[in-house]
Image (cartoon, rainbow, N blue to C red):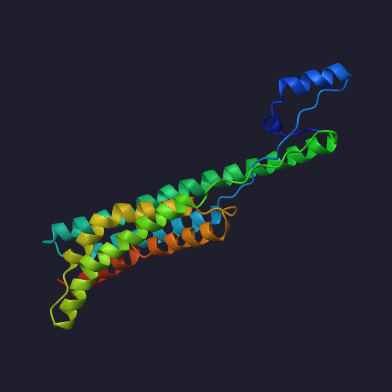
Amino acid sequence: MRFSPYVRDYRVPEEPGDAAQRTALGAAPLQPVMPPAPWVRSMPLAAGVAAALLVAGVAEIAASSGFPWNAPVESFLAWANGFGVIATAVALGVVAVVWGRLARRRARDLAGYRAFVAAHPEVTQLPRPEPRRPWRMALVGLCLAGGSLLVWLLAAALPMTVQAISGERLRYMLAAGVLWLVGAPWLVGLALSVVGARRDGGERTRRLALGGVALGLCLPVPALVFTVLYTLQITD
């Protein structure tokens, strides 16, 4: 029977005193084994978020092709925001591919461990310790995405709402400029929320990660909407 090449990683070093005692009693040396770490990352979530960001980024850059020729700053902001979204999509796509390969290796690893235990029933199986505070990365991602969204709402959405109520035309520079300033932490928070999503992290980790992902995916919405509005000359 062929075992996984990773089975050797499950061998837990035994204490010297235990080994000496078994040797004195003439017993066969035994080493306890520990099951492989379960695969807890969400590859479908990373792939889905990457696909959504890629579509949104390409759509924004395509929409900005209708900008007037004498609007270089507006074009720069649209392309910067669009390529930032696309870069995040590519990064998360790479993460999804790597996670997929690691998940297959872990599955082979687990099969090898089960085969090893079945062939050696005398080996003691040690439980794998629970992860400590797996929600911290998801919390950081939620704070970054939520804080960036709050800054954009206060610095751009609120003034534009006042302008719309007073009958003034909205300005693309205000919406896209503030979005460009907070885009980096916003996208980093989205990426950390995706990476921090763990199935073994409990309900708190799941809520924090999904909340960060939901807030992070709000970024392409105003970017695309105001790009289209400026292309249609509805805003200045």
Q: Is residue 209 above or below residue 93?
A: below
Give the percent coordinates (x, y) of residue 43: 55, 52
> From this viewpoint, is residue 63 visible?
no
Q: Quadrant of the N terminus?
A: top right
Left or right: residue 12 versus residue 73 is right
Residue 7: quadrant of the picture: top right
Left or right: residue 31 versus residue 48 is right
Give the percent coordinates (x, y) of residue 123: 81, 33
The residue depicted at 71 percent of the width and 42 percent of the height is 127
The outermost residue toward the right is 26
Q: In this view, does 1 lie above or below 44?
A: above
The residue depicted at 41 percent of the width and 54 percent of the height is 141
> From this viewpoint, is residue 93 visible?
yes
Give 133 or 67, whichever is nearer the viewer. 133
Q: In which quarter of the image is the C terminus?
A: bottom left
Figure disc tally: 0
Give 196 or 183, whichever is nearer the viewer. 196
The residue depicted at 47 percent of the width and 59 percent of the height is 208
Give the percent coordinates (x, y) of residue 153: 26, 68
Residue 215: quadrant of the picture: bottom left
Give 177 or 145, whichever is nearer the viewer. 145
The residue depicted at 23 percent of the width and 67 percent of the height is 154
